[in-house]
Image (cartoon, coloured by chain):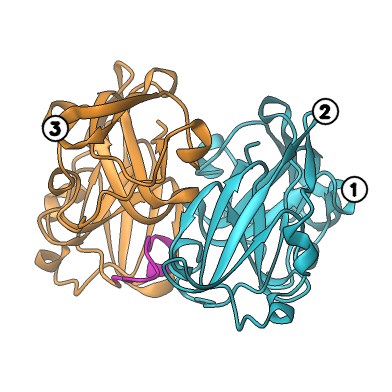
Chain colours: A cyan, B orange
Amino acid sequence: MDQANMTLQCTKSAGHWRPSRMVVWDEEGFQGRRHEFTAECPSVLELGFETVRSLKVLSGARWVGFEHAGFQGQQYVLERGDYPAWDAWGGNTAYPAERLTSFRPVACANHRDSRLTIFEQENFLGRKGELSDDYPSLQAMGWDGTEVGSFHVQSGAWVCSQFPGYRGFQYVLESDHHSGDYKHFREWGSHAHTFQVQSARRIQQ
Amino acid sequence: MDQANMTLQCTKSAGHWRPSRMVVWDEEGFQGRRHEFTAECPSVLELGFETVRSLKVLSGARWVGFEHAGFQGQQYVLERGDYPAWDAWGGNTAYPAERLTSFRPVACANHRDSRLTIFEQENFLGRKGELSDDYPSLQAMGWDGTEVGSFHVQSGAWVCSQFPGYRGFQYVLESDHHSGDYKHFREWGSHAHTFQVQSARRIQQ
């Protein structure tokens, strides 16, 4: 795991490669033990961390953090910037998970080329909608109802949220994972127990 | 206050007028007493509500909700959609305010015409940046640091957030309020005790 400090991993984006760097600490406010990452980390427990308590995304690609080891549990999109405590990335105030145990970079498409299809029912059935922009409210764009049954990511990476305005549970959907197919909520997150999705945005390069 | 149920108030947007409607309940899950609004409400206490516990934004303009009566305390942008409980609009997991007591519509500009200038220091001093798009990370657009000292809204309405990815405290900034000038954090929210601002997006029509 320490080797991750040494190698500069690059994440493909729009045909060229950009280095991505994230630094994590085991205390709030960028205190305590510090580790720098340029590639995925399946478990900070192996570093002797109980959990990540603060972090900075320094450059390059966005990251997605996970509540549990092995990329399981609640998901948190980590944009470039400073996160002095867990509430800076915490997505859901009803189920606050004060834990961030694994994380990996997200491979994004060119922002303008990001495309996502949403379906009314699971298995790509029912009415559908095409997204190529950021939508803090799917209802405002004409989507009828508060649920999405399945997704197909044609290109890019997206974050969908349970509530309007990018609130509540977050689900990261990527064209490079599952061939972009997410046919049931079990496939967009081990923590998802609902089809409720009311906002969606592109994850920017 | 009951009269608000009767009159259809319209909110100016892009030169024409659109009706805006919001329904609130005093129990979670759209249960209990119900009131429909088309204009601002300075206090739900006057309706006999202890607080709003669920709500739907049905059409027209976006709204901003406030923790306390008289449009004070934490701010919550309310996009079109369903909010079955306070955690659907709750902005800050570190200071969860399970209270929404007043709200009003937000007058937006045409989405493409929204412009915001950010300044390094209070009173419009220091380096500045011009925004005309949504920025889940100001650092990723080249802003150096995690703070904004002052704002000038040239047009439209914006929501700025304490942390990247539209997390943490939210601050609604409008060209129609304060002449668009917000020269110190005291002017962008009675709950703001910090210049920390790491993301910003337009409030869409």
Hey, which quadrant is residue A87 in on the image?
Answer: bottom left
Kindly identify which residue carries mark 3.
B123
Give the chain of mark 2: A
Q: Chain of mark 1?
A: A
Residue placed at 72% from the left, 52% from the top?
A105
| Res. B167 image quadrant | bottom left
- Asked whether residue A182 appears in the rendered view, the answer is yes
Label 1 neighbour load within 10 Å: few <14, some 14-19, many 20+? few
SS class of the residue under badge 1?
Answer: helix
CA gap between label 1 and label 3 equals: 50 Å
Q: Residue shown at 47%/54% (left/top)?
A: A82
Q: Chain of mark 3?
A: B
- The N terminus of chain B lies in quadrant: bottom left
Q: Which residues are magenta?
A: B86-97
* Direction from residue B55 to residue B82 in the image, left or right: right
The residue pinned by badge 1 equals A179
In reply to whether residue A57 is colored magenta, the answer given is no
Horizontally, residue B142 falls left or right of residue A109, namely left
- Whole-angstrom CA distance, mark 1 to mark 2, is 18 Å
- Work out how far the residue at label 2 is from the one at label 3, CA to CA, in angstroms: 43 Å
Q: Helix, strand or loop at disc 3?
A: helix
Point out which mark residue A15 bears.
2
Please state which amino acid type lies under the numbered disc 1: Ser
Residue A159 location (% of width, % of height):
64, 50
Residue A131 x/y as whole percent: 67, 35
Q: Residue at the location (78% across, 43% down)?
A: A11
Give coordinates of residue B170: x percent, y percent. Answer: 33, 51
